[in-house]
Amino acid sequence: MPSRLLLILLVLTLICSTSPVSAQDTPPSRMDQVLSFPDKLSRSLATQQSKLAGKLDRQTEKYLQRLLRQEKKLRRKLDSKDSLMANQLGLGSDSLVNSWKNVLSADSINISSLPAQYSGKLDSMNTALKFLKEQPGLNGISTAQYDKLMQQYGGLQGQLNQTEQLKKLVQERKQLLMDKLANSGVSKQLKQYQKQVFYYQQQLQEYRAALENPQMLEKKALEVLSKVPAFRKYFDKFSQLGSMFRLPGQTEDMDPSAMLAGLQTRQNVLAELNNRLGGSANTQQAMANGFKEGQSELSSLKSKLTSSLNRGEPVDMPGFKPNTEKSKSFLKRLELGTNMQSTRANNYFPTTSDLGLSVGYKLNPKSIIGIGASYKVGWGESIRKIRVTHEGMGLRTFFDWKIKGKIWATGGGEWNYRSRFDNLSVVKSISQWQQSALLGMQMKQSVGKYKATASLLYDALWQNQVPKAQPVLFRVGYNF
């Protein structure tokens, strides 16, 4: 019965993830969709592995070269003070960086020898594949297909292990330099080195998050299997997570005495303390005082940690506020935007609307620089005389700086062609384009995944324009 339920759920899910199925489809064609699931998942995994591995190689090369340059700066500064220490540490050594790069090469290191890192996604998918392989109702899916998938997930586990090993090696190197060079008069160069290490570790963390992010096919498969009681029981028993944490209801097949083997009882702990420290009142008072001092020290450390985290500072680098955008890829730092402003009809122009598109690049969480373009459309003189015309176009640059909360300061330059045209050939004359210098305030309000914007701007060059334009502009829009 569980196998039949599993099969039905798999069919329904796979149908939703592929093209619509007509009512005339026969059961064998739907079975083919079920049997094609491993091949689809295999192709998806191959693409993911290749993409992430290439990204890790490129980012590692970039950051290791930066660390190498910082070490060479440290060496030049330290040579005049303690050349022996510089030689002992091997500052600026290409061999050290090459040894780190070798961690990424499967030919130069046995990946399976690296410490295994736990991954919820890999644990879930490996357990799911083992469960499916044991189901007699799905014997149409070959063992070779499952073995290939298990090998691919093993490759993802190897990439995850490599990432953590790189993170560990770089952290150990940073700690070594901090311990040896703390009082060597190179604090400025050492601080720059620490910053590069921090950003590289942030990059590795993003890479790990990408590895942990389930693909669409994986999400659907786990969503289906999670509804099958037999799989939930199998997961509790055979997954890595289930083996580490035995919850109530999962221990019916285990010997309770085996679970308690090796654990110390409260009486045993107290007896051992009395044997080592004695049972007198003075000894017990000393122990109580020691516990109080330990609690006080722990509270102090907790307070420092909380304060540092609230300020967004790394725990081992007080006073340093990292740029959270720096470790993101170029595309993830882009922000697309739209805006619109309208103008009433006057003696020179009909009612018009300026429709703008922009793309901004996030320098840091508080600064955005970007470019844009606009198109001015005319709507006619009134509601009774609607006529769509091309009334102009423009090019824009802008810079946004966050003041506090939702309030931003914004400014930029614009070049606008403010005459009606019927074809683009007439806008080529640069002399007919008029300049604007804008400065003002902007409010950004999150609306779901997007941000609604409202800008109030002053044009410092409005009097130089012919005919004169509005000195104050109000624009509304959305950022994506």
Image (cartoon, helix red, strand yellow):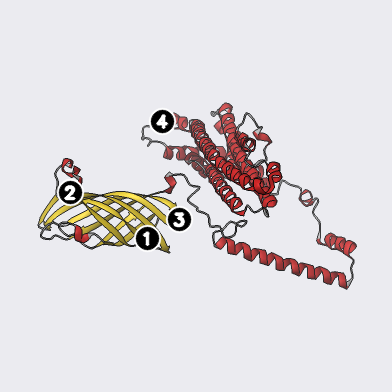
Q: Are marks 2 and 1 in contact (CB under 8 Å)?
A: no
The amino acid type of the residue labelled 2 equals Gln
Query: Which disc number belongs to residue 26?
Result: 4
Q: Which comes sooner in the sequence, label 2 or label 1?
A: 2
Q: Where is residue 342 shown, x and y percent of the image?
A: 21, 58
Crowd rating for badge 4 (residues with CA inside 10 Å; few <14, some 14–19, many 20+): few
Query: Which disc number belongs to residue 397?
Result: none
Q: Which residue is mark 2?
A: 432
Query: Which disc number belongs to residue 444?
Result: 1
- Residue at 79% across, 54% down: 263
Query: Which disc number belongs to residue 365?
Result: 3
The amino acid type of the residue labelled 3 equals Pro
Q: Which comes sooner in the sequence, label 1 or label 3?
A: 3
The amino acid type of the residue labelled 4 equals Thr
Q: CA distance from mark 2 to mark 4?
A: 68 Å
Q: CA distance from mark 4 to mark 1?
A: 53 Å
